[in-house]
Image (cartoon, rainbow, N blue to C red):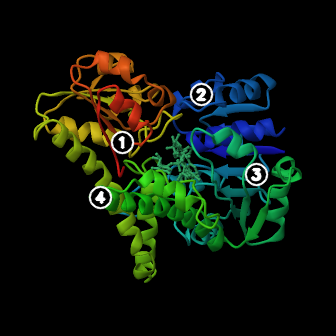
Amino acid sequence: MKISVIGCGYLGAVHAAAMAKLGHDVVGVDTDPAKIARLAAGEAPFFEPGLPDLLREGVESGRLRFTVDISEAAEAEVHFVAVGTPQLPGADGADLTYVHGAFDALAPVAASGSLIVGKSTVPVGTAAELAERLAAAGSEALLAWNPEFLREGFAVADTLTPDRLVYGVSDERAAELLDAVYSAILTRGAPRIVTDFATAELVKTAANAFLATKISFINAMAEIAEVTGADVTTLADAIGHDARIGRRFLNAGIGFGGGCLPKDIRAFTARAEEIGRAESVAFLRQVDAINLRRRERVVELALELLGGSVFERRIAVLGLTFKPNSDDVRDSPALDVAERLNGLGAAVVATDPEGIENARARHPQLAYAPDASDALRGAELAVLVTEWGEYRSLDPVATGGLMSTARIIDGRNALEPAAWRAAGFEYRGLGR
Ligand SMILES: NC(=O)c1ccc[n+]([C@@H]2O[C@H](COP(=O)([O-])OP(=O)(O)OC[C@H]3O[C@@H](n4cnc5c(N)ncnc54)[C@H](O)[C@@H]3O)[C@@H](O)[C@H]2O)c1
Ligand SMILES: O=c1ccn([C@@H]2O[C@H](COP(=O)(O)OP(=O)(O)O[C@H]3O[C@H](CO)[C@@H](O)[C@H](O)[C@H]3O)[C@@H](O)[C@H]2O)c(=O)[nH]1
């Protein structure tokens, strides 16, 4: 099939390359010429394992091309819209400017009977409004909402072998076209849920709200464990054995960040207020508050370990991205911790295997080191805030040898406390 993908960021670039892998003829469109130039050369503009191979393969096969010119999407039978829906500046709601821009640009281009598929995460009710917007623009394209559940770091596998496909549609033809797009995935047995616009939009919002709640639940237990001397990791293992609870997403630490969970729970809160149901999701404010308190806790522990002041004390911050296997620093708890310590006058030296460039663009005032050894050399305190494999496997004896004083805060509970203590470290985890 001929497919266009409008918006080639983290989601759209992966989606475009995956659609080409499924055998479709794909054009990716983005308003950012630098991004398009890299993608057109078969290069990934961000770090995502497996994406470079997929892009190269697609571009070399001729099934995948990229452009800034949306008129090149005119021949597509299906148009995926994957533009950003960031948090509004100074408010909780989602900024739909890019979605509106993409739909307004697509309306005159999309052929009658072609299908426009929203993939961006939007507040419930958005698709219905966009259907009216398309009709008002005289478009005879169909509309569907097909939310995306991929995780950064696993985006390629999540797109090619999703847990489920959700179609929000208002007529059968839209579902048929989506079945044709995803036939190779459906043949492999992926569950497919066909529903209305509102349910499809809410499935996405609810999934992220649930994941965020699970993380804040375990972080709330970490707060209790810190006062009572209990160990939150053992607690998570123990409750996780109950299949109704499950162990995944029960890792306590400095909490969730990234371009999705934080903004999506805030947008949900804002939309619930708009529809008069603020109390239904009032708990999400607590979820957000617990999450942000964990970053503060790291600062408290740093002050405690350094005798009350971090001023001009050298602190190595290991990790800048919101999670490992990504270069994404959007709403990153790791970068926030580095910033907070820096704001208190600490001599922070931060490092990350993939995130330095993006972190520097946001926080040029921080000092960055190319690798962990450089960051750790001469430091009085190490703070592990993103659990990259190479930080998890740091040798405590060698690490202690680099530092001026052996102290570590394990902000992701990623290290074996006994091994670090045996190597002479003052070790602090979160909730253990
Ligand atoms: N990143 C993820 O892991 C992920 C997963 C699931 C859902 N989502 C959702 O997908 C959407 C996109 O997220 P992202 O992380 O890829 O964002 P992003 O900021 O990385 O990418 C958005 C892209 O859209 C482009 N764009 C903006 N307006 C455009 C227009 N009118 N025409 C063409 N391109 C335009 C931007 O230049 C940018 O490249 C969001 O709604 C997000 O919540 C993201
Ligand atoms: O037990 C856990 C699990 C995760 N996290 C943190 O939670 C954040 C989000 O992690 P993850 O969900 O793996 O990353 P994303 O790539 O942002 O993916 C989420 O957001 C996407 C965009 O909506 C959805 O598509 C995915 O299904 C959803 O998992 C990261 O900061 C993690 O460090 C924890 O603190 N503890």
Can you give x and y, in whole percent of width and height, for residue 389 in the image? 51, 30
Look at 63% across and 53% down and name the residue there: 149
Q: Which residue is more in the foreground, 32 or 162?
A: 162
The crowd level at tag 2 (other Cα within 10 Å; few <14, some 14-19, many 20+) is: many
Tell me the CA gap for discs 1 and 4: 28 Å
Can residue 96 be seen here? The reply is no
Up-down: is 39 above or below 301? Answer: above
Q: Earlier in the sequence, mark 2 or mark 1?
A: 2
User: Disc 4 on helix, strand or loop?
Assistant: loop
The crowd level at tag 3 (other Cα within 10 Å; few <14, some 14-19, many 20+) is: many
Residue sitting farthest toward the front: 422
Residue labelled with disc 1: 411
Q: Which residue is more in the foreground, 48 or 26?
A: 48
User: Disc 2 on helix, strand or loop?
Assistant: loop
Q: Earlier in the sequence, mark 2 or mark 4?
A: 2
Residue labelled with disc 4: 90
Residue labelled with disc 3: 78
The N terminus - image quarter:
top right
Up-down: is 157 above or below 271? Answer: above
Residue 391 is left or right of residue 293, and the answer is right
User: Disc 3 on helix, strand or loop?
Assistant: strand
